[in-house]
Amino acid sequence: MGQFDRIYQYKSLFRRKALLSKQEILAALEISDATFKRDLEKMRDFYNYDIVYDRFDNGYRLVNTDQTYELPGLMFTHKELLALLTIQNMMTELEPSLLGPKLQPLQDRLAELLAAEGLSIQSLTKRIRAVHAGKRRLELKSFQSVAQGTIEHKKLHIHHYNRSRDETTERDISPQQLVHYRDNWYVDAWCHKREKLLSFSVDAITHCDILEETAKDMDQQEVQKQMQAGYGIFSGVDVQWAKLKFSAQRARWVQNEEWHPEQKGTVHQDGTYTLEIPYSDERELIADVLRFGGEVEVMAPQSLRQNVTLAIQSAAALYA
């Protein structure tokens, strides 16, 4: 057992028993007298453990039982620290300009604890790589306002740019939840202009004001039902079911993927795989089908099959 993990065990020992003799500690941790002295020095100097020796009772006590030592109320083994730093690094990669400044104090403290054990945060981060595909640049100001309004349950007045129509509209929305999907941020909100629940891409919100008015309160189960009924980011409760048949080779990957929580999958004797998923808007689904090229066939519904065919013909015409 390493010193860091032992220090974690000291805390457990003092929780179970207020007064511990040296022999009890040595036996419980299976350490020598010299090791115990080194541990005491480190706990007192580095982790702020106020451990005192009681001459009358011939034992050791942890005086500051109010949790004023280590990270506030927390203690980690070196494996837990590495796991926490890994998560922290991934969150920073998720959106450096947003989460980095908020997490820096914690990262500095964790790095200090690891350094005391001869471990380097620099070597850890070099071995973690986050790959982002299709990530859009996000305006920090818009995200912070949207996030604050969502957390505080306040209405937002936004300027929203619609890429399809190439126009910007103003509207008031009542944010319900933030969603991180395919490396981009969205806010699911009740739109007071259209009087329905919609999903807005946060990077398309060019201006955002937090209003004093409380946001419209919606049942969270109903929000989840509407926003997750269909495939992908598009909302809607009126769904159709797509039936996709993948080649035997591609099936080796796809049969282990989750496209939708309610999907149905069937592996056939010839190795091919049929995937059935609900969708309320076919745009994203068509794009995902096309990326598999000739290794997938849309079996149903006929309308989806026809639109995929048109998309393939349009793409082929560019290379004729």
Image: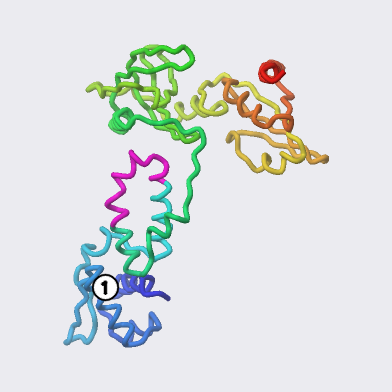
Q: Position of residue 94 (x, y in %)?
A: 42, 41
Q: Position of residue 86 (x, y in %)?
A: 43, 54
Q: Position of residue 259 (x, y in %)?
A: 60, 34
Q: Secondary structure at mark 1?
A: helix
Image quarter (top left, top right, bottom left or bottom right) of the C terminus: top right
260 relative to 306, above or below: below
Q: Is residue 290 magenta?
A: no
Q: Position of residue 76 (x, y in %)?
A: 36, 63
157 relative to 141, above or below: above
Identify which amino acid the numbered label 1 is placed on: Met
Q: In the rendered structure, which segment of residues is drawn in magenta?
A: 91-108
Prevalent SS, magenta region: helix
Q: Residue at horizontal 36%, vertical 74%?
A: 3
Q: Residue at horizontal 42%, vertical 54%?
A: 125
Name the outermost residue toward the right: 270
Q: From the image, tell me which residue sits under label 1.
A: 43
Q: Nearer the viewer, residue 203 or 127?
A: 127
Name the outermost residue toward the left: 56
Relative horizontal placement of residue 43, taking residue 319 as reference (left or right): left
Q: Residues within 10 Å of mark 1 (few under 14, many from 20)?
A: some
261 relative to 173, above or below: below
Tell me where residue 147 sits by quadrant: top left
Q: Residue at horizontal 40%, vertical 55%?
A: 84
Name the outermost residue toward the front: 320
Q: Is residue 97 magenta?
A: yes
